[in-house]
Image (cartoon, rainbow, N blue to C red):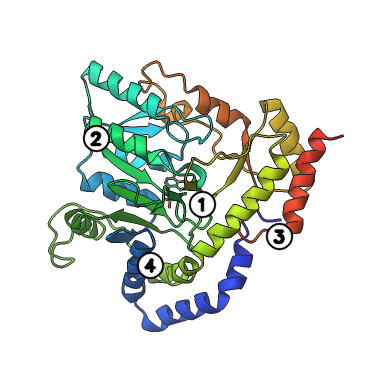
Amino acid sequence: MEFIDLKRQYQYLKQDIDKNIDDVINSTGFILGDKVEQFETELADFVNRKYAITCSDGTAALQLIYMAYGIGAGDVVFCPDMTFIASIEPACLLGATPVFCDIEKDSYNIDPDSLERQINYVIEEGKLRPRAIVAVDFLGNPADFSRLRQIAEKYQLLLIEDAAQGMGASYRGAKCCSCSEIAATSFFPSKPLGCYGDGGAVFTDDENIDKIIRSLRVHGKGKTKYDNVRIGINSRLDAIQAAVLLPKLHVLEEEIAKRQKIARTYSENLGQYLKCPVINKECISAYAQYVVVAESEEQRTTILETLKENCIPTILYYPTPMHLLPVFEGNETYGEKFENAVWYSKQSFGIPFSPYISEEEQMLVIKMIQSVFVK
Ligand SMILES: Cc1ncc(COP(=O)(O)O)c(C=O)c1O
């Protein structure tokens, strides 16, 4: 059994994907070009934003955002303690300081109360300038954007949506990638909209930011590539990736609907034994991963061993909260205990999930987990 079944998805879309790849090879336009432009237009429409700017990967998308807004030394970026390092890594690279916030016990997204506490500590200390919040749609579950927007406005911070895991999800009718001033996503193969390599995109409604990011992704180009007006990076999407992404985008809504059904089956059958995902009111999760939380670390170990013995793949997503990563050792935590992030990291695990998992496979996963509880 695959953890995420990309082979079946390819079989389903093979004709379109193969034809598109052929077109690119025959055109010999391998970087940016027509297919990328078509994908950007359709993608912007899909999430209801004016501009989608594709780039080399999700980390670069976040870097382009931090660069476009001039975030750097002396600035603080507030980040959930439970995420992938890429949410904050490019800001650190540019000299900014990360300040981590605990997560909510139900949604596993940034806890707005912890965020506001951390903002006030930074203001009181007076050494650094609060600049931005990076809110992650963790596991595909939209963050609490209503409260986050209020906090961003109150403290005049840039609210960045890291929707690397949230493509296809929605918050109160708004598609993820359109829930804040600016957003980033990733097309890493296992993401809800994944390509066959690396890829990413930035989303904005601001014409000026769109122009800056288009310049930044091609070495800070001006009117041409050799008329550079700023220091940028090389971060473009390959045409072959756009060729793969277009057919996948066309079935994304259909896949999101399937994800809801599969998640419901897991929750109905496992909810009495394990903590199953809690989706915020009026939200639809993209279920980038289906993660459950055991009652204890020991119980998790027993379940993981049982699943392994039965060749069922699992993943710890993620095993270490940001504040405990060696790279952030010694960073100021302002007394925050990160109780929820630590609890989540010790007791959670992901189980096989994709729109293409078969009923038999899903039932086997359920049966094996239940066998730990019902002797
Ligand atoms: C929350 C989050 N942010 C950013 C990224 C970075 O995306 P990429 O791997 O495409 O650079 C990822 C990908 O794993 C992610 O999960």
* Kind of residue at badge 2: Glu
* Kind of residue at badge 4: Asp
Q: Which residue is mark 3?
A: 358
**Mark 1 Cβ inside 8 Å of ligand 1:** no
The residue tagged with tag 4: helix, strand or loop? loop
Label 4: how many residues lie within 10 Å, few (<14), some (14-19) or many (20+)?
many
* Kind of residue at badge 3: Ser
* Kind of residue at badge 1: Ala
Q: Position of residue 40 (x, y in %)?
A: 33, 66
Locate residue 54 relative to residue 259 in the image: left or right: left
In depth, the one of 177 and 24 nearer the eye is 177
> Mark 3 or mark 4: which is in front?
3
Q: Which numbered disc flags the more N-terminal residue, 4 or 2?
A: 2
In depth, the one of 370 and 81 nearer the eye is 370
The residue tagged with tag 2: helix, strand or loop? helix
Q: Which residue is mark 4?
A: 238
Question: Do tag 1 and tag 2 residues touch (Cβ < 8 Å)?
Answer: no
Vertical comparison of 168 with 329: above or below:
below
| Cα–Cα span, label 4 and label 2 | 37 Å
| Cα–Cα span, label 1 and label 2 | 27 Å
Q: Which residue is mark 1?
A: 286
Label 1: how many residues lie within 10 Å, few (<14), some (14-19) or many (20+)?
many
The residue tagged with tag 1: helix, strand or loop? loop
| Cα–Cα span, label 3 and label 4 | 32 Å
The structure residue drawn at horizontal position 64% and vertical position 53%, both measured from the top left corner, is: 262
